[in-house]
Every structure is written in structure tokens, then in C-alpha cells.
Image: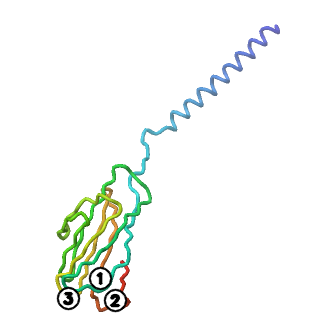
Amino acid sequence: MNILNNKNKRISIFKTLALCLFAAVSLTLVSCDDDMDIQQSYPFTVETMPVPNKVTKGQTVEIRCELKKTGDFANTLYTIRYFQFEGEGTLKMDNGITFLPNDRYLLENEKFRLYYTAAGEEAHNFIVVVEDNFSNSYELEFDFNNRNVKDDGVITVV
């Protein structure tokens, strides 16, 4: 009789353990999701050194820029474009590329320099837009010879 009780207890314990193991495996399989969330798109900004607020015809202004990313995804590409909405001038990249308005150019380095050359004495206003391939963008606005700018010699980028 004692042997039967011990055998029944062992079978009962084995059944309970098997049921618990089956429940744990079932819950694990149900809670798994095949879709893995991998963040690919990270916000970024573009920081610039101060630039003068006045430029004369033929003068070139250097704009030092640095791309500041909050994260890094290996396949992120950055492009740069500009649009001049007042005045005449040219914008060049430090690698010699002269920008055409609203054309995108691949940004190869996180630190880069832009060179704006004024073609007139009037006010010069333009925006520079840096975009990544995930539709994030950062816009810089530059105003030279603008009557609304304080005459302290340096302009900060909006």
C-alpha cells in the first residue's frame, strides 16, 4: 500500500511539473513577436559657428557646420540643399561643389564648411536644409545685410 501511495505521489508530481512546463512554454511562444523594433531614424541638428551679418559684393563668408546626431544607424544618408529667397550669390561646399538652388547633394562628412559669395550689395537671405533618408530635416536660415539685424558684427543662425 505504501509503495502504491509513493508511486501515485510521484505520478501526481510529474503530471503537475509537466503541466507547469507546458504552460510556461505555451506562454513563451504566445508572447513572442516576429517583428523586431529596430530604431533606424534618429533626430539630428546642425550646429554652426557664428558668421558675420554683413557681406559686400564679391566677398566670401565661411560657414562652419557640424552635424550632431542623437543616434547612429549605419545606413543613414544625409543630403544638403539650399534656396536663396533674397539677393544674389553662390553657395559652395568645402569639396568644391557649387550648389544649384533646391538640388540635393550627398553630405559625406559630419563636419563640413559652406562658402557663400555675394554677387550684390543688397540683402542676402537663404536657407540650408540638411535631410536624412528617413525624412528628418534640419533647416538653417542665413541673413546678410538685413536692416533688421543688429549691427554687432555677428549673426546667429535661426
Hey, what amino acid is under mark 1?
Asp
Q: Which residue is mark 1?
A: 143
Q: Which residue is mark 2?
A: 149
What amino acid is found at the position of numbered circle 2 in the picture? Val
What residue is drawn where x is 34% and y is 89%?
Answer: 149
What residue is drawn where x is 20% and y is 88%?
Answer: 121
Q: How many marks?
A: 3
Whichever of callouts 2 and 1 sits on the residue coming sooner in the sequence is 1
Q: Quadrant of residue 58?
A: bottom left
Q: Is 32 situated left or right of 96 in this image?
A: right
Residue at 29 percent of width and 82 percent of height: 143
Q: Judge the density around disc 3: few (<14), some (14-19), many (≥20) Cα neighbours within 10 Å.
A: some
Gap in angstroms between the C-alphas marked 2 and 1? 8 Å
Q: Nearer the viewer, residue 45 or 24?
A: 45
Lower sequence index among marks 2 and 3: 3
Q: How is the image coloured?
A: rainbow
The residues tagged by marks 1 and 3 sit, at their Cα atoms, a distance apart of: 13 Å
Tag 3 residue:
121
Query: On screen, 78 above or below 59?
Result: above
Q: Position of residue 3 (x, y in %)?
A: 79, 8
